[in-house]
Amino acid sequence: MLNEDRPKEMSRRQFLTTVGKIGGSAALFSVMGTMGLLSPQTLKAAAFTPPGKSDLALTSRNGKKVVILGAGIAGLTAAYELGEAGYDCVILEARARSGGRIWSVRRGTTVTEIGAAKQVARFAPGLYLNAGPMRVPQFHVTMEYCRKFGIPVEPYNNVNDNAYFYGENIGALSGQKIRKRAAKADIRGYVAEMLAKAVDQKALDLPLTAEEKEKLVTYLKIEGDLNADLFYKGSSRGGYKEEPGGRLDAGVIRDPFDLKAILNTGFGNFFSSEYTYDQQMIMFHPVGGMDAISDAFEKRLGNRIKHHAEVKEIRQSDSGVRIVYTDLQTGQDQEVTGDYCICTIPLSVLKDIPADFSPAMSRAIRSTDYDSSGKIGLQFGRRFWEEDENIYGGSTLTNLDILGIFYPPTEYLSKKGILLGYYNYGPNADKLGNMTFQERENHALKQGAKIHPQYYKEFETSFSVNWKKIKYSLGGWASYTEEDRKTHYPLLCKPDRRIYLAGEHVSYLLGWIAGGIESARLVVTDIHQRVMKA
Amino acid sequence: MLNEDRPKEMSRRQFLTTVGKIGGSAALFSVMGTMGLLSPQTLKAAAFTPPGKSDLALTSRNGKKVVILGAGIAGLTAAYELGEAGYDCVILEARARSGGRIWSVRRGTTVTEIGAAKQVARFAPGLYLNAGPMRVPQFHVTMEYCRKFGIPVEPYNNVNDNAYFYGENIGALSGQKIRKRAAKADIRGYVAEMLAKAVDQKALDLPLTAEEKEKLVTYLKIEGDLNADLFYKGSSRGGYKEEPGGRLDAGVIRDPFDLKAILNTGFGNFFSSEYTYDQQMIMFHPVGGMDAISDAFEKRLGNRIKHHAEVKEIRQSDSGVRIVYTDLQTGQDQEVTGDYCICTIPLSVLKDIPADFSPAMSRAIRSTDYDSSGKIGLQFGRRFWEEDENIYGGSTLTNLDILGIFYPPTEYLSKKGILLGYYNYGPNADKLGNMTFQERENHALKQGAKIHPQYYKEFETSFSVNWKKIKYSLGGWASYTEEDRKTHYPLLCKPDRRIYLAGEHVSYLLGWIAGGIESARLVVTDIHQRVMKA
């Protein structure tokens, strides 16, 4: 209603658009900063200017046909953004579905891992397992497409202090499930006590004034819930042995663990998993399965996606590109030509496809490693983690080889549910991934039952995935050392004549949907600038 | 499918029920403990055995009519649980609605605060403000009723590292909005550095072995994101000045704040607000408004709730209770009699109602203080906190007198939204609560606009509540000192002949819905035992 600060006749968007038109993006960002709207995240989101239809109308030539390889998120984004601008795009996709590693497994979903038997999902109707990405940080560009396409999202609850830590061979607390809140309260309490006393007793040579030291001690008292004498004697943050309630139920705080015992568990080393940049609260996921995102793109792209098209050769000349593919429904080889190619095929797959890449590019492709990644969805007939243990979402972490149990962040309070019995990557994923489906199930149940004795009683069915053995993916995500980023990685970021690579592997957001989107948007901008210059 | 651990012929519930019948609750809890199902939370939930219909059938006498004063959560719970067992209950409720302080304000809701003009909510259809309780810890008994009644819930996102801290007169960082993640990373980083170095340099006399000290330093390195030399030099956890993205966008981590500057902000003292026991993730709220809970009870109680019934006198004798009330629709005084009375009227209101309490009980009632509590809902035409700043739920905290801004934890990505422009309690709530509605709105906008310059442009309408001035409530929640809990509080927990008090004020869960429920369940058990003995 009130609007004292800015011209009344102009909406914020109109205003910013006008500034952008007059002064370009530098002026725009400067004004946004003045308006308190600028952050590196919004800057990043604002930095992409989709090509406009009007731009293309200005060019008379034909160089606007783009062949896109792969209908994963990078291919879908590229086709959508180029298509909006009037480019003629076609996506070749080997699978019957779009999405790539965005894959929500439901009743009837089948998969045949390389060298393994066929697996059919027998989940109850309405339940799903996000076999690939399962969560979206609130500041990723992915959210922008959810907003644009009207995809309903719900919080992905990545933090739950009522879930457990569980360890074996960790000293006095081995084999006990310990609420996360208890480990956090005790470790942070003892650590705050150590430092607070040291500062208070002037045992440390700190570059702080007396007043600042007092502020530090005050902070540590609050952070660790220390008593007036700076001792940690337990805290309600760690939970109760008798819960507070009505009338005279005042509650009795649990006894803290012994300093040595809790330190020897190593649980403190797990804490930061919740506050790395891209795992911080709050995260989101689409209601009903991550593939709502790829479905929304697919709906807008329609028959521009050619499914069952397995790429066999990637050819280019000075005048265009030519892609040979097998139509898996007819078994016939076909080809499609275009002016440019955007190749989003994972490098683990691409390295074995004959292609006209420069020798340096070929080497870079072959030099890129992929991480293993594996998950098992376990369906239980009763959400015992909610009903018996008051755990709604989040994860239990353990030093067992299952690494963790992830509780379903959806359909709370309902009857059945699918939890992640493990979500592994690296060598551990290979170990479990090399088992048969039945062995994986047995193993996940056996290990998980140590934490949840209800497992065997309530278990119904499972579905597991080892991404290293999933055809057309052959890995969880690209993996680069710091050295790789300096040597062969930069080559992957440049077009090889008429072929552009996109995908999470051409980003610094490895394994994230946003990595695919951001790289695709850079390629779209690149191609559009080239076309406009031509 | 598999069930190796327990007898196959018996379900877990059957098994536990059998144990309970044979051995009583002590045996039951012992067995549950052995089965790994026992926690203080589940024990508390399991401790209430609702009275059964079959029990009552055994008694031939008539002493089963209970008059309940107040249709807040305590009254609703008592009426529901007693009603299920065949008791004849009536609730007298002065308001036209049930729920008490459970109050979801929507378009058309009106309120006249004491000494103020009438306020009408002009919110857009579908939007709401939870003027009273707005979140439920996952382990509270409240969740049990949500499950039982099929009330859909969604996460209440209480933690958001992308929201801000903002302070004035706090030194070098005054007047800057700082992402929570940045303050957390820097303060925790510097603190970890101080202790890690002290331990590493053996400056402290700690009761730890060399190996344990090494584990401590390892923890501190991870917890603070320290470098190999144990220095905190910033961390991606605190965010980026250039976001990582596609291709060569490696991201540039923000520069950490100076130790003194961030220490002087006092922001570290805010951290623990997220991890006190009852604020820890994950929390919930019913989809569409907290009053879904009171509505669900009301639906099951039907005409056993008498609305527009303002209690005037509470009388009792050796043989029963007699309540005089004014029917606010007719203006006529009426009375209702019963065997027992459960009085859930807030003590701030009860103290002025003529009642046959013992002198000691009357003194205890009059001695109980109530905290102020106030909220303002601000409706904005655009969810700029999401669109411009990537903040989805959670809160921004500040040393301004608004204390905080709470972003709506629902309907993410939609167009409009109602955020909490302030949520105050204590003296601060009085300050803002004593303003007129228009002054509150002006003040909330003026202060909030320091943090969100979009405020004035996007603001549409407000609705504010000062619970001290809301008739029939007269306060946010009961407040007891430790001394109070020893002196007059215990009296409130005992029946005064035939009158029993229930409500959050008769609990150790002050201000929580669960406090009302837990106290009501204890009263229900008490009355039932008395009836069964009679």
Image (spheres, coloured by chain):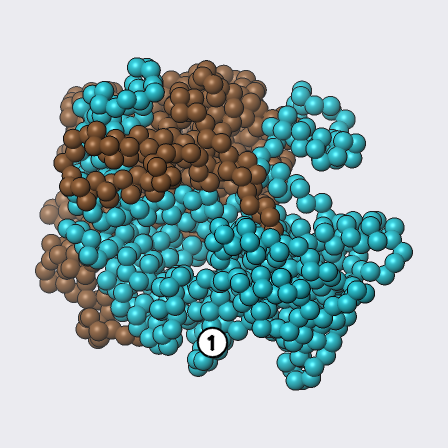
Chain colours: A brown, B cyan
> Residue B328: image x %, image y %?
63, 80
- In the image, is residue B323 above or below residue A123? below
Work out whether B191 lies above or below B522. Answer: above
- The residue sitting at the right extreme is B60
Tell me which residue sits at (19%, 61%) in the image.
A35
Is A13 on the left or on the right of B357, as rendered? Answer: left
Mark 1, residue position? B113
- Type of the residue with mark 1: Glu
Q: Is residue B130 left or right of residue A80?
A: right
Which element type, helix, strand or loop, lies under badge 1? loop
Of residue A298 and residue B135, the one placed in the foreground of this image is B135
Q: Is residue A274 visible?
A: yes
In the displayed image of the protein, which residue is found farthest to the bottom? B331
Residue toward you, A135 or A117: A135
Image quarter in which the N terminus of chain B is found: top right
Residue at image location 61% in from the left, 33% down from the top: B38
Q: Quadrant of residue B359?
A: bottom right
Residue plotted at (41% across, 49% down): B158
Left or right of A62? Residue B42 is: right
Is residue A99 toward the left or the right of residue A336 in the image? right
Vertical order, A176 against B470 (above or below): above
Image location (x, y in percent) of residue A468 = 40, 22
Residue visible at 36% across and 21% down?
A: A426
Task: Give the percent coordinates (x, y) of residue B367.
Answer: 53, 63
Can residue B262 be spotted in the picture?
no
Q: Position of residue A106 (x, y in %)?
A: 53, 37
